[in-house]
Image: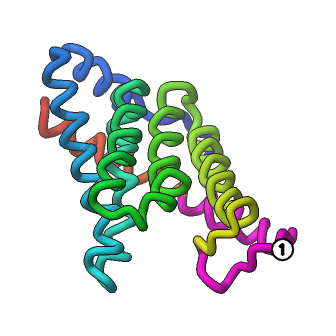
C-alpha cells in the first residue's frame, strides 16, 4: 500500500551531507530560507491577486529547513515571524498557524517517522490544530465566509479532509525537491 511505504533514504543522506557543512554555512542557508519564506508569505498582502497564489509557497522554505535540522527549522520559523512583523503585519496571524506550522511539522516529522502516512498525519494534525485555533478560538475567518466560526462536525470533517490532502501534497513536493537537490549536490 502506498501510504504504508517507507520514505526513501534520500532525506537521511541529504541530512548527512548537510551536517558536514560548517555552522556558518548552515546559518547562511537558514537566513536565505527565512527571507524566501517571508517574501512569499508577504506576497499575499503586497500583490493582491497573484500574491494569494504565491503565499502558500512559504511552506517550502520552512519545510526544507526543518528537514535538514529541527533546530534550524525552528529558527527559520521564528525569524520569518519576526520578518513578517516588519514586512507585512497583516500576514502575521496566518503564517504561524498555517503555512509555517505545516512546514515545521512536516519537516520535523521526516526526522521522527519513516512511513508516509505518519509524516502526512503529523503535518495534517498540526495544520488542523492551527486552522481550528484560528477559526474557533480567535474567530479569525482564515477560510473565508465558507466556514463559520462556530464549531460543527461537518466543518471539522471538511477541514480535516482538506488538511490531509494538502499535507500529502506537501510531503510529495518535499520528496521531489530533495531528489532534485541531491542530484545537484552530488
**Residue sitting at 54 percent across and 61 percent down?**
166
Residue numbers of the magenta segment: 143-166
Query: Could you tell me residue 101's position as x and y percent?
Result: 51, 47
Query: Could you tell me residue 50's position as x and y percent?
Result: 29, 81
**Residue sitting at 33 percent across and 64 percent down?**
88
**Of residues 138 and 120, which is closer to you in this image?**
138
Q: Is residue 67 visible?
A: no
Which residue corresponds to mark 1?
154
Question: Label 1 crowding class (10 Å Cα cut-off): few <14, some 14-19, many 20+?
Answer: few
**Of residues 107 and 31, which is closer to you in this image?**
31
Quarter residue 147 falls in: bottom right
Q: State how the image is colored.
A: rainbow
**Of residues 94 and 161, which is closer to you in this image?**
94
Quarter residue 89 falls in: bottom left
**Of residues 121 and 65, which is closer to you in this image?**
65
Is 88 located above or below residue 34 in the figure?
below
Is 46 located above or below residue 167 in the figure?
below
**Residue sitting at 35 percent across and 57 percent down?**
58
Query: Could you tell me residue 37's position as x and y percent?
Result: 30, 52
Give the main secondary structure of the magenta stretch: helix
Q: Is residue 184 visible?
A: yes
Quarter residue 107 falls in: top left
Left or right, residue 183 beside residue 130: left
Q: Is residue 117 magenta?
A: no
Is 134 located above or below residue 67 in the figure?
below
Query: Could you tell me residue 156's position as x and y percent?
Result: 78, 66
**Residue sitting at 63 percent across and 67 percent down?**
162
Left or right, residue 140 beside residue 157: left
Amino acid at each position: 500500500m502506498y501510504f504504508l511505504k517507507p520514505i526513501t533514504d534520500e532525506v537521511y543522506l541529504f541530512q548527512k551531507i548537510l551536517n558536514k557543512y560548517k555552522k556558518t554555512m548552515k546559518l547562511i542557508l537558514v537566513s536565505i530560507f527565512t527571507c524566501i519564506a517571508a517574501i512569499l508569505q508577504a506576497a499575499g498582502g503586497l500583490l493582491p491577486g497573484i500574491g494569494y497564489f504565491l503565499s502558500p509557497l512559504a511552506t517550502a522554505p520552512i519545510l526544507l529547513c526543518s528537514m535538514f535540522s529541527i533546530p534550524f527549522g525552528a529558527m527559520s520559523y521564528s525569524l520569518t515571524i519576526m520578518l513578517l512583523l516588519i514586512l507585512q503585519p497583516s500576514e502575521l496571524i496566518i503564517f504561524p498557524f498555517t503555512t509555517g506550522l505545516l512546514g515545521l511539522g512536516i519537516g520535523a516529522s521526516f526526522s521522527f517517522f519513516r512511513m508516509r502516512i505518519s509524516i502526512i498525519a503529523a503535518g495534517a494534525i498540526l495544520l488542523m490544530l492551527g486552522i481550528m485555533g484560528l477559526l474557533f478560538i480567535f474567530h479569525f475567518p482564515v477560510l473565508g465566509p465558507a466556514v463559520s466560526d462556530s464549531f460543527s462536525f461537518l466543518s471539522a470533517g471538511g477541514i480535516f479532509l482538506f488538511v490531509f490532502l494538502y499535507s500529502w501534497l506537501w510531503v510529495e513536493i518535499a520528496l521531489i525537491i530533495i531528489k532534485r537537490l541531491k542530484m545537484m549536490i552530488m
